[in-house]
Amino acid sequence: MSRLPLTNGDANNWGTILNDFLQQSLNSDGTLVTSSTNSWTSTTNTNLATTGKPGLVQLAGDLSNTSTSPTVSGIQGRSVDSTAPTDGQVLSWSASSSQWVSTTVSGTGSGGLTQAQSMAITSIGI
């Protein structure tokens, strides 16, 4: 297991011990290891974050993909349909498929309001 050199020991071995320590989290070009395997040492990257250990960004819960290109894959732990919405659609819950889906809102509410506007006013309790 890698460690930092000891100040009261490791005589004549500081460079080797320090390089071993740094190679656990740095690639050969000095950039931070972000993949599950360190390409320089061919070992498992122990620098990635977990729920119990801080480190590199770990996407969990309703986020997926990479930290530089995250994807919202759910809302409150419920899946979001991967079908792209079309103009004017809203996100609504589908109990039959147990996921959030794009839905076309049809009709109008009272006073020329759209159904979505009418629903928003009703939920506020005006």
Image: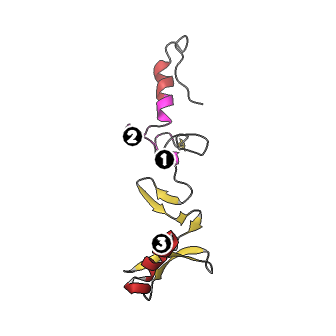
Instruction: Please report the residue visible at 45 percent of the width from the left and 43 percent of the height from the top.
Output: 33
Going 55% across and 54% down the picture, which residue do you hit? 60
Q: Amino acid at mark 1?
A: Val
The number of numbered discs placed on residues in the rendered structure image is: 3
Q: Position of residue 62 (x, y in %)?
A: 54, 60
CB of mark 2 within 8 Å of CB of mark 3? no
**Residues at discs 1 and 3 in contact (Cβ within 8 Å):** no
Calculate the distance from the C-alpha at mark 1 to the C-alpha at mark 2: 15 Å
x and y percent of residue 37 in the render? 52, 46
- Residue span colored magenta: 20-41
Please provide percent x and percent y for residue 20: 50, 29
Residue 19 shown in magenta: no
9 on left or right of 120: right
Residue appearing at x 50%, y 75% in the figure: 122
Asked if residue 45 can be seen in this view, the reply is: yes
Alpha carbon distance from label 2 to label 3: 56 Å
The image quadrant of residue 89 is bottom left
Above-or-below relation of 42 to 90:
above
The residue that disc 3 covers is 126
Label 1: which residue?
57
Query: Between disc 1 and disc 3, whose residue precedes?
Result: 1
Residue 85 visible within the image: no
**The N terminus lies in quadrant:** top right
Crowd rating for badge 3 (residues with CA inside 10 Å; few <14, some 14–19, many 20+): few
Q: Which residue is mark 2?
A: 31
Q: Which is more foreground, mark 1 or mark 3? A: 3
The quadrant holding residue 43 is top right
Residue 35 higher or lower than 85, as above or below: above
Question: Secondary structure beneath disc 3?
Answer: loop
- Please tell me which residue is depicted at 48% across the width and 37% down the height of the picture: 25
